[in-house]
Image (tube, helix red, strand yellow):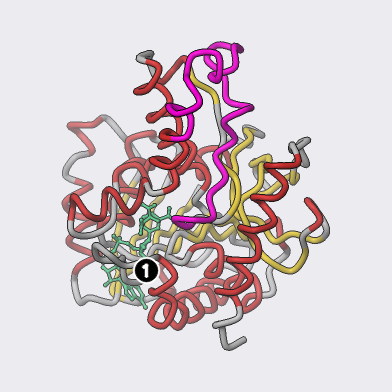
Amino acid sequence: MKVTVVGAGAVGASCAEYIAIKDFADEIVLVDIKEGFAEGKAMDLMQTASLNGFDSTITGTTGDYAKTAGSDVAVITSGIPRKPGMTREELIGINAGIVKEVSENLIKHSPDVIIIVVSNPMDTMTYLAAKSTGLPKNRIIGMGGALDSARFKYRLAEAIGCPQSDISGMVIGGHSDTGMVPLIEKATRNSVPVTEFLTADQQAEVVEATKVGGATLTKLLGTSAWYAPGAAVSELVRAIALDSKKMFPCSALLDGEYGLSDLCIGVPVIIGKNGIEKIVEIELSDAEKEKLTASAEGVRKTNGDLKL
Ligand SMILES: NC(=O)c1ccc[n+]([C@@H]2O[C@H](COP(=O)([O-])OP(=O)(O)OC[C@H]3O[C@@H](n4cnc5c(N)ncnc54)[C@H](O)[C@@H]3O)[C@@H](O)[C@H]2O)c1
Ligand SMILES: O=C(O)C[C@H](O)C(=O)O
């Protein structure tokens, strides 16, 4: 498998590193616009191969998309991250132009590629990539829910005082501070509802901490996070590479599912060799449905700022 990662910054390099360490890809190509930057990151990562025990090759290029030709998967991380106090939506002005140009360049050289969009505001950038490339909807995946669900599990394990491996749970909805819908009623600790281990106040705290997970890290780091985002992307790419049919919440172009159409938002999907193999429509409570609908309104509002 050949994987291109556009943007060799914090998240792009972390994606490349986890993909390499998990050792399922033959070739990883990093692309950036900063002269020599992707080449440097690729060389630094390649010098970890004998230490970390992987055989994937990693190369870098400054904007030469010919080097990405024949990619099976491309991850778009190019664009600016937010600073403390900002929302992800405020990044649209700069990132929309970058994501559009990058998606168009990618498909010129890799017509069969599956694109994973990471750049923020992610649901809107995924919609933009879908519209500007015209790729079938199974080949455009927005990464947000896999990360938000990992943060949800971290918060649940912390509140319960148990290992994260005991926890199963998902966050659906938009990848935004207000739009995430952590499905706390459905989350379990080894099949037992987490609600049996937590008071109502603790549950509300976990939900809130999950929703502002990215903002909390941005405040601490001065820029947004990269380790968990990179790890989350690598799991999606691995599910495609291994055709594993694992279920993740991802931003997908909806066509009537969950009563929503013509937008990308986080819902459970099955990931395999064709990208999104299936959108899974789970039974939501009335409260969960209401939150998903409100979240979709927020995403639609941001989509309205796109010049399509
Ligand atoms: N969806 C998610 O869960 C998630 C998680 C973390 C970060 N993000 C988003 O990912 C993006 C990247 O974050 P980061 O921390 O890696 O930022 P960063 O500044 O460290 O890296 C971005 C890189 O993109 C490059 N770039 C800019 N324009 C480009 C172009 N036209 N072609 C190729 N490369 C280009 C820059 O030179 C830079 O190296 C941000 O928009 C951030 O908000 C999303
Ligand atoms: O919070 C951000 O701006 C980056 C990313 O979306 C995240 O959730 O870490």
| Most foreground residue, 200 or 76 | 200
Image point (50%, 61%), residue name: 117
Residue 273 is covered by the magenta coloring:
no
| Most foreground residue, 273 or 220 | 220
Image point (18%, 52%), residue name: 221
Q: Is residue 89 above or below residue 246?
A: below
Residue 300 place in picture, x, y as percent: 63, 71
- Ligand 2, seen in the image, is in the quarter at bottom left
Q: Is residue 22 above or below residue 251?
A: above
Q: Quadrant of residue 112?
A: bottom right
Residue 158 place in picture, x, y as percent: 34, 23
Local secondary structure at mark 1: loop
Residue 163 place in picture, x, y as percent: 38, 15
* Amino acid type, residue under disc 1 in the picture: Ser
Image point (36%, 46%), residue name: 213
Queried on whether the Cβ of the residue with tag 1 lies below 8 angstroms from ligand 1, the answer reads yes
Q: Is residue 200 above or below residue 236?
A: above
Residue 143 place in picture, x, y as percent: 51, 52
**93 relative to 32 in the view: left or right:** right
Q: Callout 1: few (<14), some (14-19), or many (20+) C-alpha neighbours within 10 Å?
A: many
Residue marked by disc 1: 78
Q: Is residue 79 above or below residue 73?
A: below
Looking at the rendering, the stretch of residues picked out in magenta corresponds to: 176-204
Q: Residue lying furthest bottom in this view?
A: 307
